[in-house]
Image: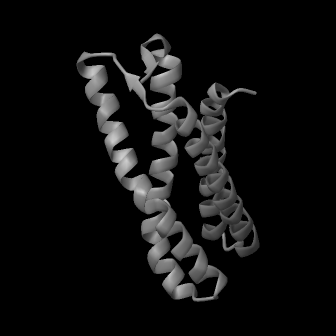
């Protein structure tokens, strides 16, 4: 495996995180607390693995430019900017939400989870969209720089 392969690993980890978040949400809606806990802990571990791989990838590969123009560039940059902005706060929200759950502060956990879940889910999904646009839909346009 090379550093370039990490972009694909990152997409897979984001996809897995998305799946675990959705299943975790469905489990708590069905009052299956143990399954919810397992899924959300799994999503946290997968997201931490993603963050580690992401940082390693960008340390070695640097910035990857999206050079496509027109409306495609506007869509890409809109998704990317919202993704980055929310990705900055997501680890803090996830840690706080997880902390409250593990400390059995269920009402406080629920209050913050109402914000954490959609933001975390959005960041996971848009991470995959950015990957697809950068490496799959317009792969010849992606250049390291």
Residue 105, compared with residue 59, is above or below; it is below
Residue at (60% x, 56% y) in the render: 21
Residue 141 lies left or right of residue 19; in this view the side is: left
Q: Position of residue 130 (x, y in %)?
A: 45, 33
Looking at the rendered image, the quarter that the C terminus falls into is top left
Image coordinates of residue 14 in percent, x first then y, are 59, 44
Q: Is residue 94 above or below residue 22?
A: below
- Furthest toward the top, the residue is 140
Asked if residue 45 is positioned above or below residue 34 in the image, the reply reads above
Front residue of 143 and 122: 143
Give the residue displayed 63% in from the left and 43% down from the top: 53
Instruction: Indicate the quadrant containing the N terminus: top left, top right, bottom left or bottom right.
Output: top right
The quarter of the displayed image where residue 115 is located: bottom left
Kindly indicate the quadrant of the structure image that contains residue 26. bottom right
> Where does residue 113 sit, x and y in percent of width and height?
49, 71
Q: Nearer the viewer, residue 53 or 78?
A: 53
């Amino acid at each position: 495996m090379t550093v370039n392969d990490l972009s694909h690993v990152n997409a897979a980890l984001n996809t897995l995180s998305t799946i675990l978040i959705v299943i975790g949400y469905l489990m708590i809606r069905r009052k299956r607390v143990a399954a919810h806990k397992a899924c959300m802990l799994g999503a946290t571990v997968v997201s931490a693995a993603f963050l580690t791989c992401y940082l390693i990838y960008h340390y070695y590969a640097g910035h990857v430019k999206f050079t496509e123009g027109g409306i495609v560039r506007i869509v890409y940059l809109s998704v990317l900017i919202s993704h980055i902005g929310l990705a900055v706060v997501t680890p803090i929200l996830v840690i706080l939400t997880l902390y409250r759950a593990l400390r059995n502060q269920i009402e406080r956990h629920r209050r913050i989870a109402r914000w954490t879940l959609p933001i975390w889910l959005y960041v996971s999904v848009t991470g995959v969209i950015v990957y697809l646009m950068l490496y799959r839909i317009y792969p010849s346009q992606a250049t390291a720089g």
